[in-house]
Image (cartoon, grey):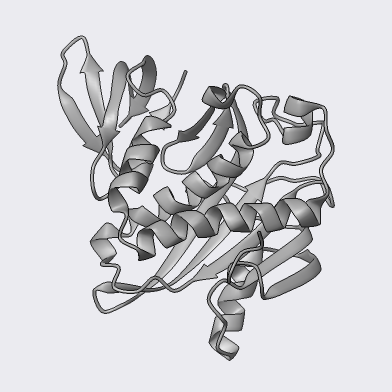
Amino acid sequence: MPALFIGTHLIKLTSIDSTNTYLQQQLKQQNVLEGTVAIANEQLSGKGQRGNIWQSEPSKNLTFSLLLRPKHLKAEKQFILSKIISLGVLDFVRSHIKHKKEVKVKWPNDIYVKNKKIAGILIENSLRGEEVNTSIIGIGLNINQLDFTPLSATSLALETGIELNLDKALGDLCCCIEVRYLQYINQNLATLHGDYHQHLYCLNELHWFESKNRQYQGIIVGITGEGKLLLESFPEKIINEYGVKEIKFLK
């Protein structure tokens, strides 16, 4: 079943610096419909979290940006968009992976299969007063690429041995994202919160982290309503909150 509005207005680009930047420029020039998707065969300067560059082999993967206009979303609650999008991408990946429990959301919104990254998400919101006005969501999802540097990345083709049609994959992914977005519109927030927590990478596991040039062990115990990571230090068992730029996963 095709999506109702996400991806129905599709802009196909051969080569561009960043689809997020492209949609930002379009917004300045004209009214852009909610659900518009701009997809590129090749992104020359795809954006990632923490200022990283998203690297993708041309015509092998899905590299696109999506425009949403969430209504009545307070700025302090905008992390719900990370939950919506990451769960939509997770649902799509899980639909192709045999061992579905291996697919996780690495906070805030990367998608991992086992210990390898398969998708990255960058959400850039503009505010009007105290509410989110527009949200431009950049998604890079590895589909058919087989060679990666670094080796900590993977793709659906590597995991399944099957090459997918990119147009069909995009349509299916848009449907998965739309299902999660409709949960938000219909105020089914408990499902979004519960599913995000359930699929959180490294949840309740002991791992090494770094914060303020200090390395220590801790256990992820959850996420705050504002999207901060709740980490219990080991062995002190003190729970602290961390923003995206305040903590780094080590191993």
Q: Considering depth in this image, is 138 or 151 the residue closer to the camera?
A: 138
211 to the left or right of 235: right
Give the image quarter of residue 203. top left
Please say if 150 is above or below 6: above
Observer able to see residue 18: yes
Quadrant assignment for the N terminus: bottom right
Nearest the camera: 210 or 191?
A: 191
Q: Residue at x 65, y 26 (%)?
A: 152
* 15 relative to 211, above or below: below
Looking at this view, name the residue that lies furthest to the front: 1
* Image height of 13 relative to 101, above or below: below
* Callout count: 0
Q: Which residue shows up at 35% across the image and 63% down it? A: 186
- Where is residue 166? Give x, y as percent: 80, 52
What residue sits 39% from the left and 57% below the top?
Answer: 183
Image quadrant where residue 177 sits = bottom right
